[in-house]
Image: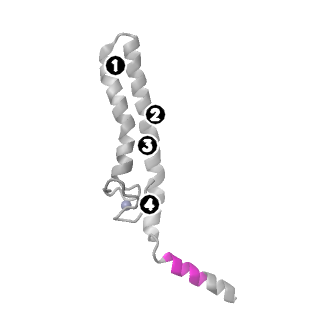
């Protein structure tokens, strides 16, 4: 009986400096969405570059000029999202910040 009481006390004490429950929910909700977006953008970028290369092969240079830069841009976009925005609250982060100053969520 005394032992279980100790566990409850320890749990309560540990909870204080952590993120609030609502913030934690927000991190969980946003993380998969952000990761999914990054994966989609990377695939889309590769696909667009492939269309552009197809344009070179078929001597359709308008395709190459239009799709290769677009593909590279789309591929690089997730890196911007990752470094510029918080994964949890989408707040703007300073360069190289590992923890969001607004909500305290750790960045990947
Ligand atoms: Zn945040």
Please identify the quarter of the rendering in which residue 5 is found: bottom right
Circle 4 crowding by C-alpha within 10 Å: few under 14, some 14–19, many from 20: some
Magenta residues, start to end: 8-15
The kind of secondary structure element at disc 3 is: helix
The mark tally for this picture is 4
Q: CA distance from mark 3 to mark 4?
A: 18 Å
User: Where is residue 97 drawn, in percent x and y?
Assistant: 36, 57
User: Where is residue 20 drawn, in percent x and y?
Assistant: 44, 71
Sequence-first tag of 3 and 4:
3
Q: Is residue 48 above or below residue 28?
A: above
Q: Say which mark, if any, is on residue 38.
A: 3
Circle 1 crowding by C-alpha within 10 Å: few under 14, some 14–19, many from 20: many
Circle 2 crowding by C-alpha within 10 Å: few under 14, some 14–19, many from 20: some
Q: Which residue is mark 1?
A: 64
The kind of secondary structure element at disc 4 is: loop
Ligand 1 lies under 8 Å from the Cβ of mark 2: no
The answer to whether 107 appears left or right of 61 in the picture is right
Q: Is residue 92 above or below residue 43?
A: below
Q: Which residue is mark 2?
A: 43
Residue under the image location 43 percent in, 23 percent down? 50
User: Where is residue 63 drawn, in percent x and y?
Assistant: 33, 18
Q: Nearer the viewer, mark 3 or mark 4?
A: 4
Q: Say which mark, if any, is on residue 76.
A: none
Main secondary structure type of the part rendered in magenta: helix
Residue under the image location 39 percent in, 42 percent down? 78
Sequence-first tag of 2 and 4:
2
Q: CA distance from mark 2 to mark 1?
A: 18 Å
* Dot 2 and dot 3 residues touching (CB under 8 Å): no
In-front residue for pair 90/13: 13
Q: Which residue is mark 4?
A: 106
User: Where is residue 73 drawn, in percent x and y?
Assistant: 34, 34
Q: Nearer the viewer, mark 1 or mark 4?
A: 4
């Amino acid at each position: 009986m005394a032992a279980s009481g100790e566990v409850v006390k320890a749990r309560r004490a540990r909870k204080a400096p952590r993120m609030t429950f609502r913030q934690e929910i927000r991190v969980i909700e946003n993380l998969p969405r952000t990761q999914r977006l990054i994966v989609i953008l990377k695939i889309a970028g590769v696909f667009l570059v492939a269309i552009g290369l197809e344009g070179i092969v078929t001597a359709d240079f308008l395709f190459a000029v239009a799709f290769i830069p677009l593909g590279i841009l789309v591929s690089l976009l997730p890196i911007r999202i990752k470094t510029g925005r918080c994964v949890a609250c989408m707040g703007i982060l300073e360069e190289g910040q590992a923890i969001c100053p607004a909500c305290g969520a750790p960045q990947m």
